Amino acid sequence: MTGPIPILRVGRVLLATIQTELRDNVANAFQQDVLLALERGAMAGLVIDISGLETVDTYVARVLADTGRMAKLMGVETVLVGMRPEIAATLVRMGYAMEGVQTALNLQEGLAALRKKPREE
């Protein structure tokens, strides 16, 4: 990947762990890198770990939600994990529901959610 956020392939799941604050240009590069990685492989899921984020502004919230919706259009389920209470409160206050993106408390629960998803359909 070309951006500062590592995107790892774990089986048929892409795992992106955000450990730096997402400035607008970094968020844009991250979104582009994720979409290119999804295009290259037959992925079943995308997990975005935001446990390293201290703050989320409206632009970053939109990029995360849009990335999940874009992945869904490409046939890939997205789970956002590691959301801190402050981030959740901020998103609710901003009116962001993260529609189209599943959430889970941590990485383990996020991977479990992706594993059981095909059986539910």
Image (spheres, rainbow, N blue to C red):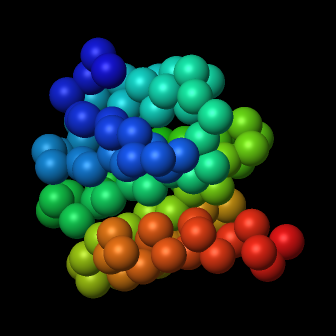
**Percent x, y of residue 58:** 41, 52
**Percent x, y of residue 109:** 42, 79
Give the quarter of the image for residue 38. Answer: top right
Q: Is residue 64 left or right of residue 51?
A: right
Give the quarter of the image for residue 22. Answer: top left
Q: Residue at x 16, y 59 (%)?
A: 52
Could one spot residue 95 in this view of the protein?
A: no
Q: Is residue 30 above or below residue 51?
A: above
How many circles with numbers are drawn on the protein? 0
Q: Is residue 19 left or right of residue 46?
A: left
Outermost residue, front direction?
Answer: 11
Q: Residue at x 37, y 81 (%)?
A: 105
Q: Residue at x 85, y 72 (%)?
A: 121
**Percent x, y of residue 46:** 51, 50
Q: Is residue 56 above or below residue 59?
A: below
Outermost residue, right direction?
Answer: 121
Outermost residue, top direction?
Answer: 2
Q: Between 19 and 94, which is closer to the camera in this rendering?
A: 19
Q: Residue at x 58, y 67 (%)?
A: 114
Q: Is residue 96 left or right of residue 44?
A: left
Q: Is residue 87 left or right of residue 68?
A: left
**Percent x, y of residue 33:** 42, 25
Could one spot residue 1 in this view of the protein?
A: yes
Q: Quadrant of the N terminus?
A: top left
Q: Between 23 and 38, which is closer to the camera in this rendering?
A: 38
